[in-house]
Amino acid sequence: MKVSVVTPSYNQGQFIRRTLESVASQGGAEIEHVVFDGGSTDDTVEVLKRFGNGIRWTSEKDKGQTDAVNKGLRATDGEIIGWLNSDDIYYTDAIARVVAFFETHPDVDVIYGMADHIDLVDYAFEAYPTEPWNFERLRDTCFICQPAAFFRRRVVEQHGLLDESRNFCMDYEYWLRLGKAGVRFAYLEQKLAGSRLYAENKTLGSRLKVHGEINDMQKALFGTVPDRWLWNYAHAVIDERVDRKTSPRWFALRMIFVMLKAARRWNGRISPEMKTDLWGLWRSFLKRPSSH
């Protein structure tokens, strides 16, 4: 069974060697590794040149991460596909475990495993909050860690590539789109990957844009946005502007205002559950003394 690993890359020279090494150390299958770099201006290309013949790579201007992943999907032919960003890593025997599971479960199309959040020096400082498969639950929270997920080539053939209109939640959109289509997922309760989390990475550095795009994506796929994501969006709007501890009343009032706007913007209405929650927030606002 052949496994294709696709790595999108841009200016991750400080990490990409560890990413490449984590793939090169894998066994249990024939592995092809392709890197599509968006024309990095740091030392990424030098690292790729020095690494040797274990990878295929190209470095040229592209339209972003989603475009790079799609180029990799089109350029490979492995029966199983893994997508590993240029700052993430596979753990020992990750691919061998995935291949063994796919071989004994021919009806499963997507496997995702457990993972860690890792820091700048690969230290695992917390577990990624993965959960057993539940499609409705996935709408409320993305419990699939992208570097710990693998899917069959037939998924791409039947359901297409990543949505290139998405710059932040392209993986989450893909899992939801596949789940909506009835694709069969399986949860492998073994740690497969480390997902790097640090202040400068794309997701943490663009929190408000991320949550806005997730809401737009959910609206496009399902026609509505779960209340939980509206709350997440409101927190992204307010958290950096109002200190909840020192100004609790102002925080509560701002939350009510932003939530009402968000609910009307994406859902056109306020759900009964949200009305209850906002009423509770309003009562807490009335009871709390103002801060000075």
Image: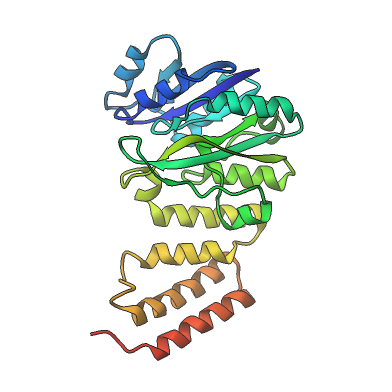
Looking at the image, residue 36 sits to the left or right of residue 17; the answer is right
The residue at the far top in this view is 53
Quarter of the image for the N terminus: give it: top right
| Camera-nearest residue between 96 and 152 | 96
The residue at the far left in this view is 292
Q: Quadrant of residue 254?
A: bottom left
Q: Where does the image place residue 289, in percent across and percent down from the top left? A: 33, 89
Looking at the image, residue 224 sits to the left or right of residue 117; the answer is right
Q: Quadrant of residue 48?
A: top left
Residue 55 in the image: above or below residue 104: above
Looking at the image, residue 239 sits to the left or right of residue 186; the answer is left
Q: Where does the image place residue 230, in percent across and percent down from the top left? A: 52, 65
In percent of the image, x 65 and y 34: which residue is there? 160
| Camera-nearest residue between 179 and 10 | 179
In percent of the image, x 58 and y 37: which residue is there? 162
Q: Where does the image place residue 37, in percent across and percent down from the top left? A: 40, 25
Q: Quadrant of residue 285?
A: bottom left
Query: What sort of colour scheme is used for the picture?
Result: rainbow
Residue 92 in the image: above or below residue 28: below
Q: Is residue 210 visible?
A: yes
